[in-house]
Amino acid sequence: MKKSLFFLLFSVLVLSACQAGNEQTAYDLRNDTTNPSLMSNPSGYHPNYDVGPRSDQNPNFLNLRGTSLNDASNRNNMGTDIDIARDIVNRTGDFTAESIWINNAGDQMTVSVDRKGRLSGDERDRAINTLHKKLVQALPRYDINIRER
């Protein structure tokens, strides 16, 4: 009895969904003028749709190319800063650059130097102070620490 009742109910639902000859039952999105069409793409220019240039890049990714879309000149490049510091240290006649580190926050630079020759205490202090001034002048964004080996 239950199986026949279930089969009868199912057949009534299937047959009621098939109404032949009634063309007005389907909703036509193209002919509907009562509501704005939010499902279609906007056609033509409209001020609300002008959002500027679009990119296929995910906006949540880090900008590894620089500050603007194709400009890498304004970027704070730590590798270039390390090269500048190494060049300044090696240009002095008293020291050679060993290792140069920038911390993760990007505000402190540690420069390890090696003496080329023998310097007395006062000469060494003056040479380190001069080197520190040159590095601060060239790279003012960093707090520079000089370590002598």
Image: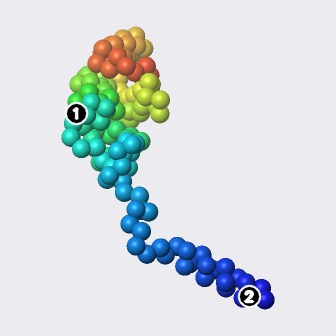
- Left or right placement of residue 19 versus residue 92 in this view: right
Reading the chain from its start, which is encountered first: label 2 or label 1? 2
Q: Nearer the viewer, residue 76 or 41?
A: 41
Q: Are marks 2 and 1 in contact (CB under 8 Å)?
A: no
Checking the image for residue 93, the label placed there is: none
Mark 2 neighbour density, 10 Å: few (under 14) some (14–19) many (20 or more): few
Placement of 79 over or under 126, stated as above or below: below
Which residue position holds label 1? 71
Callout 1, which amino acid?
Asp
* Label total for image: 2
- Left or right placement of residue 65 versus residue 6 in this view: left
- Left or right placement of residue 2 versus residue 119 in this view: right
Furthest-right residue in this view: 1
Question: In which quadrant is the N terminus drawn?
Answer: bottom right
SS at mark 2?
helix
Quarter of the figure with residue 28: bottom left
